């Protein structure tokens, strides 16, 4: 699967969506749309967030699934929360 | 290699606590077989006299309790979030694993006998002591230093994983916790 580019290759700022196309009838929609916070996460961070949701937010279950200790998983979650806060600020600055 | 210095990324909570209890019992057995006192969170001293198993296991209990009380209290004071007491207790007890090897330095009273020989030699001729027993003790002393450094590294990683502190809270908090835990354990052992 092709990876969606989320940052400008020239200046590294966050990218916006300017054009969308309907895959059924080829209708084009143009505008300026923000990508969601999750889109800016790395594939590893997205996988971690997905595991978190699939485990109903249970860090204990995640620790068991990832074969890591509870505090390690909690630290990874704290890092993810911090990362999402940074992305939110960056998106707000770009609008 | 990572498991030697930071097993806490994989093991904390009840698993670490169970391993920590086994380690404490093994260390106490070793201490009572080979006349060693763990009389402080960081201390290990070789005795010439017998060390009862009750004394040895009490040392382990006091050291683990003092380390836990100070490390947990400091982590709360410094603002650790979502910290579970069982993780702190378990990882700190598991971090004492290197000290299981410490009593082996005194198998057959090796270190205490050589220590006494050094003292006698110094008393009889302070300016020209016999170097033989000192040299005989050197490998065990060096091994002890390695074990102490290894245990401190494990304590540090236990603190790091449990608290998720960074910067000054990580380093300064750890130094303060280790120092205070050592002082508290010495005080408790002196009072008992």
Image (spheres, coloured by chain):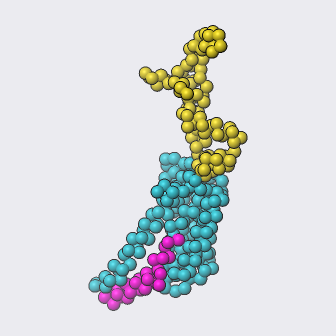
Chain colours: A yellow, B cyan
Say if B132 sits above or below A40 in the image.
below
Is the C terminus of chain A in the top left, top right, bottom left or bottom right quadrant? top right
Towards the viewer: B11 or B58: B11
* Residue B114 shows in this picture: yes
Q: x%, y% of residue B10?
A: 58, 53
Towards the viewer: A32 or B177: A32
List the single residue furthest toward the left. B128
Residue A6 lies in the magenta-colored region: no
For image coordinates 58% across by 75% down, the residue present is B28
Q: What segment is highlighted magenta in the picture?
A: B100-125
List the single residue furthest toward the right. A56
Q: x%, y% of residue B124?
A: 33, 90
Q: x%, y% of residue B6?
A: 51, 56
For image coordinates 51% across by 24% down, the residue present is A5
Towards the viewer: B86 or B127: B86
Q: Quadrant of residue B116?
A: bottom left
Say if B43 sits above or below B48 in the image.
above
């Amino acid at each position: 699967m092709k990876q969606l580019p989320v940052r400008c290759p020239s200046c590294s700022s966050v990218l916006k969506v300017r054009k969308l196309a309907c895959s059924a009838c080829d209708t084009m929609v143009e505008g300026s749309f923000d990508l969601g916070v999750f889109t800016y996460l790395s594939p590893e961070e997205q996988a971690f967030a997905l595991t978190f949701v699939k485990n109903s937010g249970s860090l204990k279950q995640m620790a068991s699934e990832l074969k890591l200790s509870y505090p390690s998983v909690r630290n990874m979650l704290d890092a993810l929360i911090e990362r999402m806060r940074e992305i939110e600020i960056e998106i707000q600055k770009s609008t | 290699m990572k498991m030697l210095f930071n097993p806490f990324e994989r093991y904390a909570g009840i698993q670490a606590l169970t391993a920590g209890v086994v380690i404490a019992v093994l260390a106490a057995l070793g201490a009572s077989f080979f006349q060693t006192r763990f009389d402080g969170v960081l201390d290990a001293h070789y005795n010439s006299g017998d060390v009862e198993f009750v004394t040895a296991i009490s040392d382990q209990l006091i050291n683990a309790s003092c380390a836990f009380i100070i490390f947990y209290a400091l982590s709360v004071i410094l603002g650790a979030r979502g910290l579970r007491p069982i993780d702190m207790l378990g990882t700190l007890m598991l971090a004492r694993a290197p000290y299981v090897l410490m009593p082996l330095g005194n198998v057959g009273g090796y270190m205490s006998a050589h220590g006494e020989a050094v003292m006698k030699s110094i008393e009889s001729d302070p300016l020209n002591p016999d170097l033989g027993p000192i040299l005989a003790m050197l490998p065990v002393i060096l091994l002890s230093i390695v074990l102490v450094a290894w245990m401190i590294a494990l304590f540090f990683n236990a603190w790091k994983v449990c608290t998720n502190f960074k910067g000054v809270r990580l380093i300064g908090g750890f130094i303060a916790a280790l120092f205070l835990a050592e002082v508290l354990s010495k005080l408790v052992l002196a009072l008992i």
